Amino acid sequence: MRATGSLHLTWALIVCYIMTGHCVASQKKTSCHVHNGRADCSHLSLSGVPPDLPRNITSLDISHNRLAGIPPASLKPYPDLIWLDVSFNSISGVDAGLCKTLPLLQMLNMAHNELHLLKKEDLNQCSNLIQLNMASNRLKLQGEPFSELQNLKYLDVSSNKLLSAKLGSQLQLPNLVNLSLAFNDFTTLKKDDFFFLNHSSFLQVLVLSSVSLKTLEPGCFKPISGLRSLIVDGSNMGTLVISKLCSELSATSIEYLSLRKMKLVTLTNTTFTGLQKTSLTFLDLSHNGLGKIEEGSFQWLSRLQTLVLADNNIKHLTNVTFQGLRSLKKLQLTRALVKSHTSATPIIDDFSFQPLGALESLILQNTAVRDITEHTFTGLTSLSELDMSWSSYISLKNITDKTFASLAGSPLTKLNLAGTAILQINPGSFSVLRNLTKLLLDNNYIKQTLTGKEFEGLSQVQEIHMANNHQTVNLSTTSFDYVPNLRVLTLGKSLRATALNLDPSPFRSLSQLTVLDLSNNNIANIRENILEGLVNLKVLKLEHNNLARLWKSANLGGPVLFLKEARNLMNLHLDSNGFDEIPVEALRGLSNLTELSLSENLLNSLKPSVFNDLKSLQILRLEKNLITTVRPEVFKTPLSNLSLLVMDKNPFDCTCESILWFVTWLNNTNMTSVPDVRDHYRCNTPLTYFNRSIVDFDPLSCKDMTPFQALYILSSTAVLMLLVTALLVRFHGWRIQFYWTILINRTLGFSDASVEEGRQFNYDAYVIHAEEDTSWVERRLLPLENDKCKFCLQDRDSVPGTMKLESIVDNMRNSRKILFVITERLLKDSWCRRFKAHHALHQVIEASRDSVVLVFLQDVHDYKLSHSLFLRRGMLRPCCILDWPVHRERVPAFHQKLLIALGMTNRLQD
Ligand SMILES: *[C@@H]1O[C@H](CO)[C@@H](O)[C@H](O)[C@H]1NC(C)=O
Ligand SMILES: *[C@@H]1O[C@H](CO)[C@@H](O)[C@H](O)[C@H]1NC(C)=O
Ligand SMILES: *[C@@H]1O[C@H](CO)[C@@H](O)[C@H](O)[C@H]1NC(C)=O
Ligand SMILES: *[C@@H]1O[C@H](CO)[C@@H](O)[C@H](O)[C@H]1NC(C)=O
Ligand SMILES: *[C@@H]1O[C@H](CO)[C@@H](O)[C@H](O)[C@H]1NC(C)=O
Ligand SMILES: *[C@@H]1O[C@H](CO)[C@@H](O)[C@H](O)[C@H]1NC(C)=O
Ligand SMILES: *[C@@H]1O[C@H](CO)[C@@H](O)[C@H](O)[C@H]1NC(C)=O
Ligand SMILES: *[C@@H]1O[C@H](CO)[C@@H](O)[C@H](O)[C@H]1NC(C)=O
């Protein structure tokens, strides 16, 4: 979070800087910054030294302001100053008291001011000064202004339009090491110009850049004979003056001479004569437009170790060009031989480098030469590095065993042939390079099948770089059989898409290999054993291929677990392969893996424990996939030691289930850096969070989930129960009501069956029947009467004189059971329906359900029965329901059943 904050600030500053141009000075900083005893007051439009800085500051930068002077009084509060920068102001003079006020001052920068007259008194007290910069003023020296600077080591008076190099007449500046007189107007170095430095045995560096010297008086460098480095870049002197300069330098200890950008078009065999006796080791002649080097030009430079001829226009190197450079170790010829449309292709003759027996490094970058031959490099017996990259040589198009034959005598270890338009490498091409350890062949047009013979003889080679060969290289199973010591092999954007569909693997003999780059090849097919034998492989780059099919569970023959042999992998790059699934076993055993990159695939839901073996993981990249959920089952292990996680631009699902764990992890991690977490980790779903940052996800919304869940379960149960009840009531309400009434009756004790039992009955059954069924009753029922069984028939047994209702009630009460003879006619009989049935029901409830017996003469629907008589079959015991048989022979059985029904105890047998 803090990192994002500072990022915002930086952006604000950049935007603001673009808009105003100056605001870093005027808006970012409105006062001095003080840190560690250093005060930065630059760019504040100040016209004086701020008086309110900490007293003990040792360094004060007050450059780029509007100071017109530095009165000592204004610096009095800061006596500890060691370092004072007042450059880029409008100061016109040095106040005599300055160094007195600042006795500890060692560095004074007054460049880019308007200093003019400089007198001895001005710097009188500055004996502790070590560094004084007065560049870009308009100095006019009066007397001996520098004479008291006993300890000064660096003095810069460049760009002052000085008309002489003579800064004094007396001996002074005994400790001066570095003097810059560049960009001044003098054209002559007089014999006694440097006399004031006669005792300065320490002077080592003299800068005379862009000083147009015309005359050098003999002995002009004599007073500074300890000189080691001379820089005269950009001086417009001409060959003669240069050669004069060299002769004057012969009296010095010169080691380093820089003659860049001097329009030195021709070197003659006398230019450097004067340097013969010196111990010059470094000579820079770059950017001179040098076209012609005369035979023997360098013959004087037998001690030279480094020669820089870069960026010139040399036409021809011959077997005598470098004659005499016996000690040369490094020859830099980058863009030294070039072809332009006005000139012919430069030529390197056979044996041109033969004089360079000590040469170790030859840089021929960006050169265009007619060709190299079997003898071009002959004689380079110490050469260990040859860089011919980005050059064009005809014979490199088709490299054969002749091409580098001239290097047979060289202990070459590094050969750079990148960007040299190679088309083909023939067998044995490098066989003479027995010491080679590094071969660079990137950015060519190699188009062939590597049989292995191309690398014959390269038994010491450790690195072969062959990237970017336009996917035209094919491999065979023997491609690398001659290079068993290979550590690094890069074949990115070089291989044909089918090149790796080989068995056995072309890499199987490379047991030392640690880095293998197969990226950008559009490879779709590799075998499971591709990495077999690569026991030391640490880095595997497979990004930008087409390997998705290999890991699909639907793949014919199952997923191809091509990583299973590479147990020591530390870096694995699998970006942009179209992967949409990772088999659980794919990354098994990679316990040393520290970096895993799977960006820009189509990964959505990852299987639990797929990353569980990645216990050393420090960097994980999964950006631009289709990941919606980040759950602990998948990510707990890989995220546990991580220092960098890049997972932005995924369509996160911001629900408690999918993201809560991740958001909490992000909030609590203080080891892992997650760049852009606020801006580039956005929710895709649900709609309420769409396009909002995942860090805005509210974890509290998940905390309340448990009560909500309970409430949900509760309410849904209630609704369900209500539904069931409603249905039950609708279809079985009568049953419930019936049993309920019985229950109430029983518990409240209105009628107890046992009480009922003991009652005296006059009749065994009260018979209810329709008027029309009287004949059936008389014919079928009454014959059953005997002294044990007595029926009550309303018409026959009612006591005359009593009310009809009353007698019905009495008779029913005096009967043990009530017997209904049920026919359609009974249901229509209003008396039966209204009163008798009602009362019978009452009896049933009162005396429990066994007191009613139904005899059906006809089949009557239960619905009609309940509708008319308020009785249902289901209310009674099955044995109390009898059907009048149609067949005559079953009548005795009916009688038997009826008697059982009537003779049963009224008690409920529960
Ligand atoms: C300068 O003095 C301040 C207190 O005035 C002190 O905190 C600081 O450490 C001192 N700095 C140095 C470089 O001595
Ligand atoms: C320089 O070259 C000239 C011919 O161009 C030759 O006469 C002279 O002897 C050479 N000098 C040296 C020192 O090689
Ligand atoms: C340089 O080559 C020429 C022929 O081109 C030959 O005559 C001469 O001897 C060679 N010089 C040296 C020093 O090899
Ligand atoms: C390269 O040279 C070999 C013979 O040396 C030849 O067979 C081959 O065709 C050449 N290849 C190209 C691309 O010119
Ligand atoms: C080059 O290899 C040879 C053996 O092939 C060995 O004797 C020699 O020391 C090696 N040179 C260097 C510089 O490694
Ligand atoms: C992992 O690295 C350690 C040491 O860094 C090494 O001992 C071990 O063999 C490596 N490989 C595996 C699979 O752990
Ligand atoms: C992150 O932590 C802060 C306090 O440490 C807390 O207020 C905030 O709710 C947390 N956010 C998440 C997403 O856990
Ligand atoms: C986070 O930092 C605290 C101290 O600042 C430390 O005690 C704690 O172990 C750290 N947590 C992790 C996961 O490193």
Image (cartoon, rainbow, N blue to C red):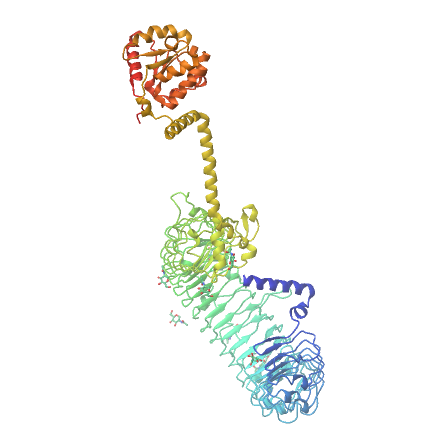
Q: Position of residue 645 (x, y in %)?
A: 49, 58
Total count of labels: 0
Where does the image place residue 189, in percent across and percent down from the top left? 66, 87
Vertical position of residue 881 compared to residue 93: above or below: above
Residue 604 appears in the figure: no
Q: In the rendered view of the protein, which quadrant contains the N terminus?
A: bottom right
**Which one is nearer the viewer's eye here, 639 or 703?**
703
Left or right position of 893 against 164? left
Q: Which residue is at the front of the view, 550 or 488? A: 550
Q: Residue at point 52% right, 84% down?
A: 279
Query: Quadrant location of the C terminus?
Result: top left
Q: Position of residue 164 (x, y in %)?
A: 68, 87
Q: Residue at x 46, y 26 (%)?
A: 730
Residue closest to the far bottom: 170
Relative image position of residue 98 (x, y in whole percent): 66, 87
Q: Is residue 633 left or right of residue 225?
A: left
Q: Is residue 27 visible?
A: yes
- Rendered view: 870 above or below 298: above
* Residue nearest the viewer, comparing 673 with 433: 673
